[in-house]
Image (cartoon, grey):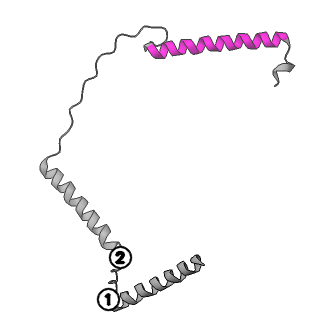
Amino acid sequence: MNITSLTPAQLRKAATLKEQIEKLHKQLAQMAGSGATAGRKASPAAPKAVKARKKISAAGIARIRAAQKARWAKIKAKAPKAPAKKARRKLSAEARAKMAAAAKARWAKIRAAKAK
């Protein structure tokens, strides 16, 4: 519905409804904020009692720990093993010297081409 197509009477009625809605929202917020229900005032909130926590014995903790370790051992036993890494090959000093000489020759060639 387009607001420009409304009659003045419809606009007034819409404005009235909007005001009523805002009042109701304000009342609801007040009721929720103060803790009152159905128009009655709530009594001050009493402090909540803290419940004592149940403690697990050392033996209970040990049983839980042992069971968890057993679960992990079972999972790890089923998991595929990672392949062992291959040993890296080492170059001999002779091969390394050849590679270094070849690299120097390449760079010398590049520098000579730039100098021209």
Principal SS element in the magenta part? helix
Looking at the picture, tell me which residue is in the foreground, 93 or 21.
93
Whether residue 93 is visible here, answered yes or no, is: yes
Residue in view at x 33 percent, y 15 percent:
45
Residue in view at x 45 percent, y 83 percent:
104
Quadrant containing the N terminus is: top right
**Residue situated furthest left in the rendering:** 58
SS at mark 1 in the image:
helix
Q: Is 31 included in the stretch rendered in magenta? A: yes
55 lies above or below 41: below
What is the x, y in percent for residue 28?
54, 15
Q: CA distance from mark 1 to mark 2?
A: 33 Å
Graded by Cα atoms within 10 Å as few (under 14), some (14 to 19) or many (20 or more), the crowding at tag 2 reads few
Name the mark on residue 93: 1
Residue in view at x 30 percent, y 69 percent:
76
**Residue situated furthest bottom in the rendering:** 94
Whether residue 92 is visible here, answered yes or no, is: no
Residue where numbered disc 2 is placed: 82
Q: Which residues are magenta?
A: 8-33
